[in-house]
C-alpha cells in the first residue's frame, strides 16, 4: 500500500499536494516550484518527458525484490532524453524492458548503454532490450559500457559474451550482436576499471551533446560505477548502488552543485540484509550536503525503505534541506 502511505507521509511533511486517492504525487519536500512531472500514468501509457531539451526519466525505481503488487517497481534503469530522442540508457534492471517500451524508448537513437554494475536488478533485462533492438534495423554499432570483472562478477565484455556468444552463449541465437552479422547492430562492449571502488574515473566518449564520466564506487565486492552526466550548464549525478564514493569522485564533484543527484535508497543493516553495500539515509544526507544538488531524488526504492520513509527523510534532513523527491517508475525529471 505504498501510495496511501506515501500520501500520508507527504501530507505530514509538506502539508499539501499529495492526492490521497492515487498517491501519484512523487515525494517532495522543500519549497521549490513543481518543476518535475508529478502525475505519471502507469500501465501502458506513453512517457511525457518534454520533447525539447534534456530530461532524465526513471524507467525503474525499485530494487531486487519482486514486491509491491500493483505498485511494483522495475529494477533500476534510467533513460536520458534530448529533444524527444532516447539517447543514453543507464542500467537495465529487471522489468526495465517493459518500462522502456512504455516510455517510448528506442535502441535506434541510443548513443550507448552504460551499466553501474552487474547485479540482476541493474542488468537483468539488458538481453531483452538489446534483443528488441535487433528488430529496429539499427546499423551503427552500439557501445555497452560497464564495470570490469571480480570474483563472481564477469565484467561487462564477458557478461555479454556469456549471454550472446554464438558458441557458448545462453542466448547463442543472438550471437550476431557480437560480430555485427545477421542484421544485428554490433555491440561494442567495454570494461571500465573499478579498482575496488577507488580507481580513476573514465570519460565515456559517446556523444558530442553531453559528457559522461564513469567513477568507480564502493558496493561491497561488486565492481561498480557511478555516473556524472553534463549537458550544457546542467548536470546529473547517479551514484548507483554504493556505500561510499571514491575520494576522487567527491573531489571532482565538489564544486559542481548538480541539478539532480539520484541516490539509491536502501535502509541498511536490518536483520537478514547484507551490510556495507548501500549508504544509509543519513549518509545520503551527508552526501547531499557535500554536493549541494538542486534536487535530491531517492530511487532504488524498496518496501523496507518506503515503510520507514519518514524516518529516512528525517535522517536526510539533518544534513540536507533542499527538495527531496521519491522516484517512481516512469517519473521524468526535466533538466
Ligand atoms: Zn540494486
Ligand atoms: Zn547492487
Image (cartoon, rainbow, N blue to C red):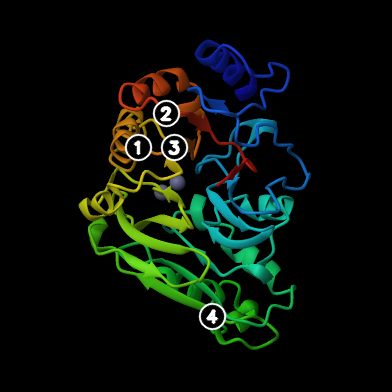
Residue underneath mark 1: 292
Question: Could you tell me how far apart the alpha carbons at marks 4 and 2 are, in whole angstroms?
Answer: 47 Å
Residue underneath mark 4: 165
Q: Nearer the viewer, mark 3 or mark 4?
A: 3
Q: Nearer the viewer, mark 4 or mark 2?
A: 2
Asked whether the residues under the numbered discs 1 and 2 touch, taking CB atoms below 8 Å apart as contact, a structural biologist would say yes
* Mark 4 or mark 2, earlier in chain: 4
Q: Horizontal placement of 99 versus 125: left or right? A: right
* Mark 4 or mark 1, earlier in chain: 4
- Respond yes or no on whether mark 3 lies under 8 Å from ligand 1: no
Residue 328 in the image: state x and y as whole percent.
60, 36
Residue 37 visible here: yes
Question: Could you tell me how far apart the alpha carbons at marks 3 and 4 are, in whole angstroms?
Answer: 44 Å
Pick the front one: 207 or 310: 207
Residue underneath mark 3: 294
| Mark 4 Cα-neighbour bin, 10 Å: few <14, some 14–19, many ≥20 | many
Residue lying at 48% horizontally and 57% vertically, measured from the top left? 232
Q: Horizontal placement of 136 versus 16: left or right? A: right
Amino acid at each position: 500500500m505504498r501510495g496511501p502511505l506515501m500520501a500520508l507521509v507527504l501530507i505530514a511533511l509538506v502539508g499539501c499536494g499529495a492526492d490521497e486517492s492515487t498517491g501519484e504525487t512523487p515525494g517532495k519536500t522543500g519549497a521549490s516550484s513543481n518543476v518535475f512531472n508529478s502525475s505519471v500514468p502507469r500501465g501502458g501509457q506513453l512517457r511525457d518527458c518534454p520533447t525539447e531539451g534534456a530530461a532524465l526519466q526513471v524507467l525503474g525505481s525499485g530494487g531486487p525484490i519482486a514486491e509491491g503488487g500493483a505498485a511494483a517497481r522495475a529494477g533500476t534503469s534510467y533513460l536520458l532524453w534530448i529533444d524527444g530522442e532516447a539517447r543514453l540508457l543507464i542500467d537495465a534492471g529487471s522489468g526495465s524492458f517493459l518500462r522502456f517500451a512504455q516510455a517510448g524508448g528506442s535502441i535506434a537513437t541510443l548513443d550507448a548503454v552504460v551499466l553501474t554494475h552487474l547485479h540482476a536488478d541493474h542488468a537483468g533485462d539488458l538481453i531483452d532490450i538489446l534483443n528488441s533492438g535487433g528488430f529496429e534495423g539499427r546499423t551503427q554499432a552500439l557501445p555497452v559500457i560497464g564495470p570490469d570483472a571480480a570474483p563472481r562478477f564477469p565484467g561487462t565484455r564477458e557478461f555479454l559474451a556469456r549471454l550472446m556468444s554464438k558458441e557458448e552463449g545462453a542466448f547463442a541465437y543472438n550471437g550476431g550482436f557480437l560480430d555485427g552479422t545477421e542484421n544485428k547492430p554490433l555491440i561494442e562492449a567495454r570494461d571500465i576499471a573499478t579498482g575496488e571502488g577507488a580507481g580513476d574515473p573514465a570519460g565515456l566518449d559517446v556523444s558530442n551533446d553531453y559528457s559522461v564520466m564513469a567513477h568507480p564506487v564502493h558496493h561491497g565486492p561488486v565492481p561498480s560505477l557511478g555516473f556524472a552526466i553534463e549537458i550544457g550548464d546542467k548536470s546529473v549525478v547517479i551514484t548507483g548502488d554504493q556505500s561510499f564514493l571514491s575520494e576522487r569522485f567527491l573531489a571532482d564533484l565538489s564544486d559542481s552543485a548538480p541539478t539532480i543527484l539520484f541516490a539509491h535508497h536502501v535502509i541498511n543493516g536490518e536483520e537478514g540484509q547484507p551490510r556495507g553495500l548501500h549508504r544509509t539515509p543519513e549518509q545520503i544526507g551527508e552526501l547531499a550536503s557535500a554536493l549541494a544538488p538542486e534536487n535530491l531524488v531517492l530511487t532504488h526504492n524498496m518496501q523496507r525503505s518506503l515503510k520507514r520513509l519518514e524516518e529516512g527523510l528525517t535522517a536526510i534532513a539533518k544534513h540536507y534541506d533542499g527538495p527531496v523527491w521519491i522516484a517512481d517508475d516512469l517519473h521524468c525529471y526535466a533538466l
